[in-house]
Image (cartoon, rainbow, N blue to C red):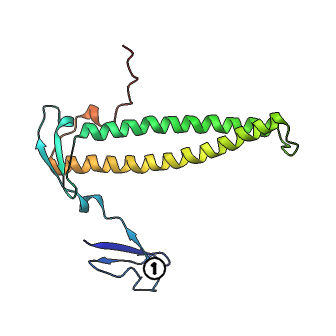
Amino acid sequence: MKKDYICDLDGTKWGGIDVPSVCPNCGAEGELQAPALEEVFTYKVVLEKKDPLDTIIERSGIKAHLTIREVRDALASNLKLKKECEGQITLDKAKIENVQRNHPAIKDLKPVEVAAVLIYADSVESITKCERKLEEIEEANTLLERTEKEIAEQVGIAIPLEALKPEEPKAPVDL
């Protein structure tokens, strides 16, 4: 398999089969670049369905059957998680502002101030985790969108216009 590298120091790019990971220009260690999606996978229709979103597709490189609906469901799930993370960040930032406004001198730790410090620390930690998760979600969504386009191009599935944007997850129904 072809490997592509980029130099950490001068940005030189090189690649090939069984190439060294050191830059041919300056000798610095290179960073292995992920292969482009289109170089890794090919797609073919296994079972065509009436609704193109439910057509079963085989992906080479790894054998996996999937539907565009499953890709859309993953996108919708990520959109829901993204909204939850953004909401949590807003809430935690408000908590931090409240603690800073109401307890500027946290040196004399009284019980109520200890509680405020705990709320503050918890919120800072939560924001960091949610922001990291949002980055992961964006990366996953980019890959899912590229996968959907690549599938459509390789197997010739016409994606209905109403299906261009993934649906927001539906609320569970109480029975």
Residue 89 screen position, x and y as percent = 59, 39
Which residue lies most toward the left here?
A: 47
Please identify the residue farthest to the top as the structure is shown.
175
* Residue 24 higher or lower than 130, as above or below: below
Q: Is residue 165 visible?
A: no
Placement of 20 over or under 114, stated as above or below: below
Give the residue at x 25% y 59%: 38
Please identify the quarter of the rendering in which residue 101 is found: top right
Q: Which residue is mark 1?
A: 29
Query: Residue drawn 48% across and 79% down?
Result: 10
In the rendered image, residue 79, in percent from the top left (x then y), is placed at 42, 37
In this rendering, the answer to whether 112 lies above or below 40 is above
Mark 1 residue type: Glu
SS class, disc 1: loop
**Location of the C terminus (image quadrant):** top left
Label count reads 1
Q: Is residue 88 left or right of residue 57?
A: right
